[in-house]
Amino acid sequence: MDVKVNATNVVWHFSQIGREEREALLNQRGGTLWLTGLPSSGKSTTAYTLEYELNRRGFFAYVLDGDNVRHGLNKDLGFSASERQENIRRVAEVAKLFADAGIIIITSFISPYRKERDFARRIHHDSDLNFVEIFMDTPIEICERRDPKCLYAKARRGELKGFTGVDDPYEPPLSPEMVARTDEHPPESIVAQIIEFLESVGYLPVGSQQSSPVYRPAAASGLKAI
């Protein structure tokens, strides 16, 4: 991703506290879990279920959600290709900052283009930060049936232009760390699989997978898969 640099006369200031000290304080390794997939593929439901379960187990995790970020940080952006690119660039940079602070960040964004997702991965790896791409591989017909906002129907009628999966492409990941099928497994099962994977690669300490079942908070029990 080529980004025009307008900032001049700026110098990076180094903290007196190292990443290792921050991670020791939190007793965890920071990193970003990047959930990507079609609209209504189950990204947000999985992200918030995972956030709850990680925090329940004593880990500091936080979700950056596509809709929520557009209420503030990215409220000035629309949905053209260039604005989608800037949306993901900003989110990737914010996620990297959170990860450097020792927090486990879970991003829930369609992020339809490989180039932008590759950019997010690269800036994490360049800073020696964990990055896990999780592809929510839900068939489009399932996504359309779930769609709580009826956006697919509007796009099919021509009332909504540039909608991912209808008249704007979604480029599936070529080599994601994980693939999740929300049409085959409930959120709790997918979250358990993610945690097991994070343990297997050393991003979570072995033994964090507890014998108790995964629960979502009561307030989230009515969440639809979006």
Image (cartoon, rainbow, N blue to C red):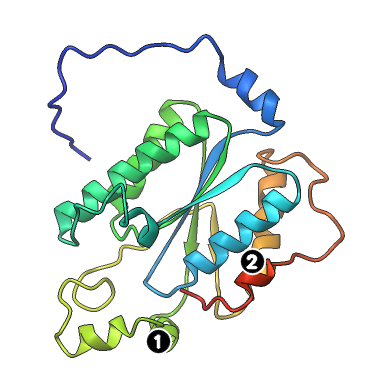
Image spot of residue 128 (x, y percent):
50, 27
Give, as a three-letter code, the residue at label 1: Glu
Query: In the image, 34: left or right of 152?
Result: right
Q: Nearer the viewer, residue 119 or 186?
A: 186
Q: Quick one: label 1 or label 2, which is nearer the N terminus?
A: 1
Q: Look at the picture and state if 21 lies above or below 128.
A: above
Q: Residue at x 20, y 70 (%)?
A: 168
Image spot of residue 19 (x, y percent):
57, 21
Image spot of residue 57 (x, y percent):
76, 49
Q: What is the CA distance from the residue labelled 1 to the residue labelled 2?
A: 20 Å
Quarter the C terminus occupies: bottom left
Mark 1 nearby-residue class (10 Å; few <14, some 14–19, many ≥20): few
Q: Residue at x 51, y 76 (%)?
A: 225
Q: Nearer the viewer, residue 218 or 87?
A: 218
Res. 129 visible in picture: no
**Which residue position is annotated with label 1?**
141
Q: What label sits on residue 190 in the rendered view?
A: 2
Image spot of residue 160 (x, y percent):
17, 79
